[in-house]
Amino acid sequence: MNLPAAMLIAVGILTALPAGGEERLTLRQCVEIAMKNHPNLRAADGNVAAAEGRLLQSGSAYYPQVQASTGYSENHSLGAFGDSVTKMYATTIQANQVLYDFGRTGGNRDAAKAGRQSAEQERTRTIQEVVLNVKQAYYALLQSQRLLIVAQKTLDQSEVHLLQAEAFFRAGSKPRFDVTRAEVDVNSSRLGIITAQNRVRVSAITLNQAMGTEPGRTVTVEEREFQLVTMPSLSFTEAEALRNRPELLKAESDVEMTRSRVTAERSGYWPTLSANGSYTWANGTAEMGPFKGDVGDSWNAGITLTVPLFEGRVTEGRVSEAKANLLTAEAQRDVLRQAVLLEVNQAYADLESAAARVGVTESSLKTAQENLSLAQGRYRAGVGPSIEVTDAEVAALKAETDHVQAQYDYQLAVAKLEREMGAVTKD
């Protein structure tokens, strides 16, 4: 179930534009690629198909079991009145139908239905996990791309400062120390560029892995406009999680499956009523001494009541095991419910913290940029020291890095809260 529109990130996805001959992927496109390619989803589809096959098997007792056979036989036997010889070609059709088994077939079929529902919920959980991993990798790549821009801007500022320091040194108004310090800053900024480029490369590899594509595939992603969301109440998020989380729905299906198995195993105490019949088309001869005749067609039909008188307490053991499995499944469901509530509360707290960090880092960034502008202006006017510019550049770089980190942490926190509430969104 998707969250209300007011609860989702209100972001504008820019039109995909070619860059360097490459198409920039939106988040939706990345998710759709993952839905087509990720091996975990193929495995989940296989598990659902297997559960469907078990469901078909469980209902087989509702239908008659029909077999056909054909063949040739020759029988020789010795008797007091001479040898008996029978030679015969025969074709037989035999049918058997269970009429009533006191809930065995019904219990097995109910268990298989619950098993299929469990597999379907597990597939939903896998989808949500894949989508969240894609979003996490997508935001990490966006963050790396933004930080690369920040690193390039820092390098540009350092180079401008170096040119100013060299000009002041040649004019004799500033010491050589300003030049060497500026050169150190430029080299440090160049190292920052290398680190940022490597981070982009690793983030792209991670995104390819999350989409289920080859790690060496070139991928670039489209920037997303950042905007805060309207947060729901904590009680609402908890209720949505308890209602929609596929892990809880799967646990409920597992409980139903084990409960149905108790019913199926209890039927072992009771008899089974079945009907059977067969018809044989025969063509052959039977000889006994001087007597000789043809073998004719034959048929038989009957109803059988099979009563379990003593099975060495095997049914008792199976029922006991099924009851114990039911208690375990119920306990695991209750433990999972508590874990889900804990995860929702943690995700909610993380989102609140991320929102606060966005506001704080935005304010810090504005202050740091203003300080940098003042320091650069003082230095250009020849009244400020070089170290003041360097410190202001470092502070501005940290402030912008923190702000970028906070923005993408916030977007990821929204995606995680959606996941904890059981939502599946492609944007």
Image (tube, rainbow, N blue to C red):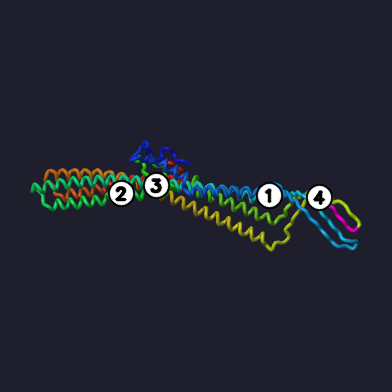
What is the three-letter code of the residue carrying label 1?
A: Ala
Near mark 3 (Cα within 10 A), the count class, few <14, some 14-19 or many ≥20, is: few
Near mark 1 (Cα within 10 A), the count class, few <14, some 14-19 or many ≥20, is: some
User: Which SS class for mark 3?
Assistant: loop
Q: Is residue 286 magenta?
A: yes
Upstream in sequence: badge 1 or badge 3: 1
Q: Which residue is mark 2?
A: 197
In the image, which is nearer the foreground, mark 4 or mark 1?
4
Q: Which residue is mark 1?
A: 61
Residues drawn in magenta: 284-289
Per the model, the C-alpha gap separating discs 1 and 3 is 52 Å
Q: Which residue is mark 4?
A: 282
In the image, which is nearer the foreground, mark 3 or mark 2?
3
**Label 1 near label 2: C-beta < 8 Å?**
no
Upstream in sequence: badge 4 or badge 3: 3
What is the three-letter code of the residue carrying label 2?
A: Gln
Upstream in sequence: badge 4 or badge 1: 1
Per the model, the C-alpha gap separating discs 3 and 2 is 16 Å
Q: Main secondary structure of the magenta part?
A: strand
Upstream in sequence: badge 3 or badge 2: 2
Taking depth in this image into account, of 389 and 82 the one nearest to the observer is: 82
Most extreme residue toward the top is 15
| Residue appearing at x 26%, y 51% in the figure | 192
384 relative to 268, above or below:
above
Checking the image for residue 217, the label placed there is: 3
| Residue appearing at x 8%, y 48% in the figure | 172
